[in-house]
Amino acid sequence: MRDRLLDAVERLLVKGGVDAVRLDAVAAEAGVSKGGLLHHFPSKRALVEGMVQRLVDRFEALLPGPDAPPGAYTMAWLDSSIPEVAPEPGTTGRDELPMALLAATGGPEVLDVLQRHYRAWRERLDADGLPPGVSTLVGMAVDGWWTARLLHLAPPHGAAHVDLRRLVADLIATGRARTGPTTADPADAAGESR
């Protein structure tokens, strides 16, 4: 039942944004009584916390584990947020759910949940094994791009989207190349032991 209710929240967010998320609207969208909703989520804040946690879990499921090669986490950050092909103008997909805005409407306690996760994600970006600044720059570019898409602040479309995304991916690839060994040890190449 919790998933059914959170699915309803998600549909309302896509259709009408954060303002559409009201307890009576969620209950109606899910086809349950308001009492049924309140049994699982006793307040709007609890509902928002549940939705934020669901979106966090969904995002984290796309990220590689700690044993991933250098740059894998940074590339997953890009891949999970910015599609390779630009979405059609005026369309909204699951990747555009306003997690940060949703968290902000739940008050400082709910926003704090997202901020804690975000700090941990940023620490992983910083420790992704790329040269200093590369992961941070990619993270900031992706976050700005995602925000521009979310708020319809003239994000790139069509070929410009594809070209810009390729530039960000190339930055990651260049960073990966710079983290590899610069020169091979002749003894290692010959298979000799020391």
Image (tube, rainbow, N blue to C red):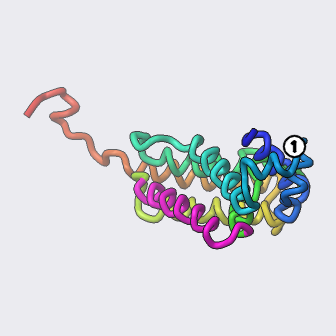
Residue 178 or residue 39, whichever sits in front: 39
Measured as percent of width and height from the top left, residue 126 is found at 44, 60
Per the image, the residue denoted by label 1 is 32
Q: Amino acid at mark 1?
A: Val
Q: Residue furthest bottom?
A: 108
The answer to whether 9 appears left or right of 124 in the picture is right
Measured as percent of width and height from the top left, residue 131 is found at 41, 58
User: Where's the N terminus, which quadrant?
Assistant: top right
Residue 66 magenta: no
Residue 18 or residue 50, whichever sits in front: 50
The answer to whether 98 appears left or right of 175 in the picture is right
What is the magenta range?
A: 105-127
Q: Quadrant of residue 23?
A: bottom right
Label 1 CA crowd tier, 10 Å (few <14, some 14–19, many 20+): some
Would you place residue 61 above or below residue 107 in this image?
A: above
Does the magenta stretch mainly form a helix, a strand or a loop?
helix
Going 67% across and 50% down the picture, which residue do you hit? 55
Going 69% across and 58% down the picture, which residue do you hit? 46
Residue 114 magenta: yes
